[in-house]
Image (cartoon, coloured by chain):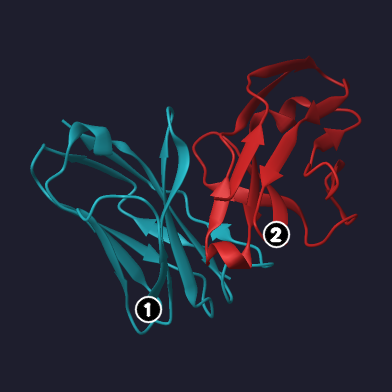
Amino acid sequence: KAGVTQTPRYLIKTRGQQVTLSCSPISGHRSVSWYQQTPGQGLQFLFEYFSETQRNKGNFPGRFSGRQFSNSRSEMNVSTLELGDSALYLCASSLQGPMNTEAFFGQGTRLTVV
Amino acid sequence: GDSVTQMEGPVTLSEEAFLTINCTYTATGYPSLFWYVQYPGEGLQLLLKATKADDKGSNKGFEATYRKETTSFHLEKGSVQVSDSAVYFCALSDQTGGFKTIFGAGTRLFVKA
């Protein structure tokens, strides 16, 4: 079965712009989590959605937002981009949620802000 | 809050050497513990997991035992291969911490032929 698909794979944006990243989870998975990966900060949790509801949110500014659709696909949006937002953004899906179940990761979207 | 601390890398070993990557955690509840691996240019893959104290997770020759008394989940492999070169992440998820997984900083492993 198809894995977690993230689009686009690479993105270059200018400071001040906004960006939308997409994640299609594995069929049947209802939980989608988003992470930011940078060399300096490692993997930082952004938020988690389950059945279109945000269940948890990490410590990121309000410029970072997300949503989940009825088919479990998820998008995250970053507005007013800053240079420090350059990172690999990873999406993970699981059946029920990260508790006691395996999270399947996509290959990520590499965002570069110039 | 919950946190995971793992040994800093990089770790460089020769093929067939013994591997240990240390991981300790802090959690308010009774977390599940995981090791994930990230190969170059790819996302993370679950390597092994343990859901309660004294459980041993194992996969592809890697093992880790959930030690509640020492709050540790050290990753071990008896004989590493060049193909094991990757970044390894220790992680926990704790119901009392909400529906999220907390990751350690990652440890890069280089295995030389």
Q: Distance between the residues labelled 1 and 2?
A: 23 Å
Residue beneath the point at 19% across and 53% down? A63
Q: Which chain is cyan?
A: A
Frontmost residue, B84 versus A67: A67
Would you say A81 lies left or right of A51 here? left
* Mark 2 secondary-structure assignment: loop
x and y, in percent, of residue A25 in the image:
46, 69
Residue A53 — which label? 1
Three-letter amino acid code of the residue under disc 2: Pro
Q: At x 56% / y 62%, what residue is drawn? A: B97
Q: Quadrant of residue A102?
A: bottom right
Q: Where is residue B35 in the image (x, y as percent from the top left)?
A: 70, 46
Among the chains pictured, the one given red colouring is B
Residue A74 placement (x, y as % from top left) = 35, 69
Res B4 → quadrant = top right
Residue type for callout 1: Thr
Q: How crowded is mark 2: few (under 14 residues within 10 Å), some or many (20 or more)?
A: many
Side of A63 relative to A45 (left or right): left
- Which dot marks residue B31? 2
Instruction: Give the mark count.
Output: 2
Question: Residue under mark 1: which chain is it in?
Answer: A
